Image (cartoon, helix red, strand yellow):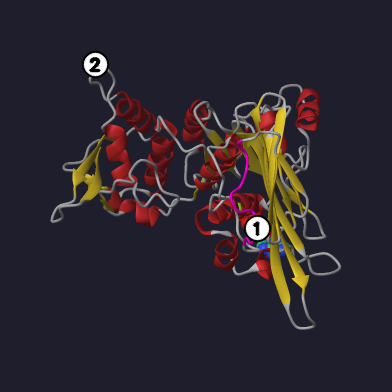
């Protein structure tokens, strides 16, 4: 089944006081510095943190409730909410999506003490015309389902911060609702927020069994490229690697070949070496240019035949020549047929490759809150129609679409 997140809802998390962001196969956010684009990534990363480590740890890792709660407005925020809707159960659809929503409430319990409580709600469609829900509120779990198999063994006495995204509930049987909840949890646990650390990507990477995906910081680049190299079709051709190499050569013409080699002096590390036009010997990735490393990282992600369900990419244009961005945008669109991508950029050239549905203008008001999206796709389309064919990137740069200074 092709799981997809159709939308993200955030309230009072950092600058996102009231954000309802529809997500397509490819969604690209633009807007001034500090508009709140990365805060959208933080919200998704927060849900990933909850699914890995639980709510309390995810909050602690980000400095606690007060640090992540919106600091604007007349009085301190007492509730943050992050939710997603999407297709996880068999009979969910765009019209009737499944939903997950997590609220964390901060309540005063005495003159000196506040306490945090979570309210978690899952809604799914495991049978035709059947909506079921699971709600965790304080110490209670409530399952609302007409299906006989959807019972819990011991619904009482759950921790007030426990999350079913993190630990499965004690279902009595093989329950279809439990299965849908597990799918939401798995999906959110796989969200990747890609923000490569070029310095780390240049270093030899250990050979691991987790070389299946490129890590958030690209620190396993060599190991992941080796994984892509090993993929062969029926005729034994390394078709993924060949396509990736062709793109590398198109974007950085002096690169003739890319090699993944055992790092000299180690048994368990891999390094990347480049063959460059006009140069004797090979260039180690440690000595390659900043943009070369970033291009390798991005192309590795776009050529991954089985990418994680959702990849967020920070500042896709960073360090990359505008002409190269056109090719990368094409590869990104192809990759978005296999998985979902959410991107930030400051490049009008990259934006010009987008359709109005893919383009999200982000702004920040004087009240400190983000406006995301600041324009609907219809409003974007109206501006495009009135411009008589001016590229969307130029319209944005000229400040006709908002998201400028
Ligand atoms: N708890 C909070 N309450 C209100 N604002 C916050 C909170 N935490 C962070 N911020 C604000 O979020 C802003 C940064 O937002 P973000 O990183 O999402 O911007 P951005 O659009 O990604 O910008 P850039 O293009 O520079 O990367 C800062 O102005 C910071 O003060
Ligand atoms: Mg940012």
Q: Residue at x 62, y 39 (%)?
A: 150
Q: CA distance from mark 2 to mark 1?
A: 58 Å
Task: From the top left corner, tell me how far across and down residue 236 is, in percent.
Answer: 23, 20
Residue 249 included in the magenta stretch of the image = no
Task: From the top left corner, tell me how far across and down residue 401 is, in percent.
Answer: 76, 38
Quarter-of-image position of residue 58: bottom right
Task: Please name whichever residue, 124 or 360, is drawn nearer the observer in this view of the structure.
Answer: 124
Q: Residue at x 72, y 25 (%)?
A: 129
Q: Is residue 376 above or below residue 72?
A: above
Task: Please name whichever residue, 167 or 329, is drawn nearer the observer in this view of the structure.
Answer: 167
Q: Magenta segment range?
A: 149-158
Q: Mark 2 packing: few (<14 Cα in 10 Å), some, or many (20+)?
A: few
* Secondary structure category for the residue under label 2: loop
The answer to whether the residue bearing label 2 lies less than 8 angstroms from the nearest atom of ligand 2 is no
Task: Please name whichever residue, 257 or 85, is drawn nearer the observer in this view of the structure.
Answer: 85
Q: Is residue 274 above or below residue 15?
A: above
Q: Mark 1 packing: few (<14 Cα in 10 Å), some, or many (20+)?
A: few
Q: What residue would you read off at disc 1? A: 156
Q: What residue would you read off at disc 2? A: 235
Main SS of residues in magenta:
loop
Query: Total number of numbered labels?
Result: 2
From where the camera sits, is residue 302 visible?
A: yes
Task: Find ligand 1 in the image and state its quadrant.
Answer: bottom right
């Amino acid at each position: 089944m092709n799981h997809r997140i159709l939308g993200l809802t955030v309230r009072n998390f950092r600058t996102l006081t009231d954000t309802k962001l529809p997500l397509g196969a490819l969604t690209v956010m633009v807007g001034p510095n500090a508009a709140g684009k990365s805060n959208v990534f933080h919200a998704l990363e927060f849900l990933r943190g909850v699914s890995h480590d639980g709510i309390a740890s995810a909050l602690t890792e980000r400095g606690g409730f007060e640090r992540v709660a919106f600091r604007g407005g007349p009085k301190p925020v007492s509730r943050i909410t992050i939710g997603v809707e999407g297709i996880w159960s068999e009979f969910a659809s765009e019209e009737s999506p499944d939903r997950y929503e997590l609220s964390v409430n901060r309540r005063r319990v005495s003159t000196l003490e506040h306490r945090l409580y979570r309210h978690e709600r899952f809604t799914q469609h495991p049978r035709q015309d059947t909506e079921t829900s699971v709600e965790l509120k304080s110490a209670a779990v409530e399952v609302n389902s007409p299906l006989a198999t959807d019972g819990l063994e011991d619904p009482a006495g759950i921790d007030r911060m426990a999350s079913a995204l993190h630990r499965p509930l004690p279902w009595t049987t093989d329950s279809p609702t439990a299965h849908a909840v597990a799918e939401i949890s798995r999906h959110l646990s796989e969200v990747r927020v890609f923000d490569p650390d070029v310095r780390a990507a240049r270093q030899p990477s250990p050979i691991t069994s987790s070389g299946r995906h490129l890590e958030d910081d690209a620190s396993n680049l060599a190991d992941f490229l080796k994984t892509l190299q090993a993929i062969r079709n029926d005729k034994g051709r390394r078709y993924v690697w060949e396509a990736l190499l062709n793109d590398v050569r198109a974007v950085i013409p002096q690169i003739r070949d890319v090699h993944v080699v055992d790092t000299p002096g180690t048994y368990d590390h891999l390094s990347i070496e480049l063959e460059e036009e006009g140069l004797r010997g090979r260039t180690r990735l440690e000595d390659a240019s900043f943009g070369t490393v970033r291009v390798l990282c991005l192309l590795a992600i776009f050529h991954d035949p089985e990418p994680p369900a959702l990849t967020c990419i920070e500042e896709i244009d960073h360090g990359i020549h505008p002409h190269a961005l056109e090719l990368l945008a094409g590869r990104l669109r192809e990759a978005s047929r296999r998985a979902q991508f959410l991107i930030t950029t400051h490049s009008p050239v990259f934006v010009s490759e987008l359709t109005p549905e893919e383009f999200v203008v982000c702004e920040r008001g004087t009240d400190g809150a983000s406006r995301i999206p600041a324009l609907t796709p219809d409003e974007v389309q109206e501006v495009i129609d009135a411009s008589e064919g001016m590229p969307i990137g130029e319209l944005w740069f000229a400040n006709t679409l908002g998201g400028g200074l």
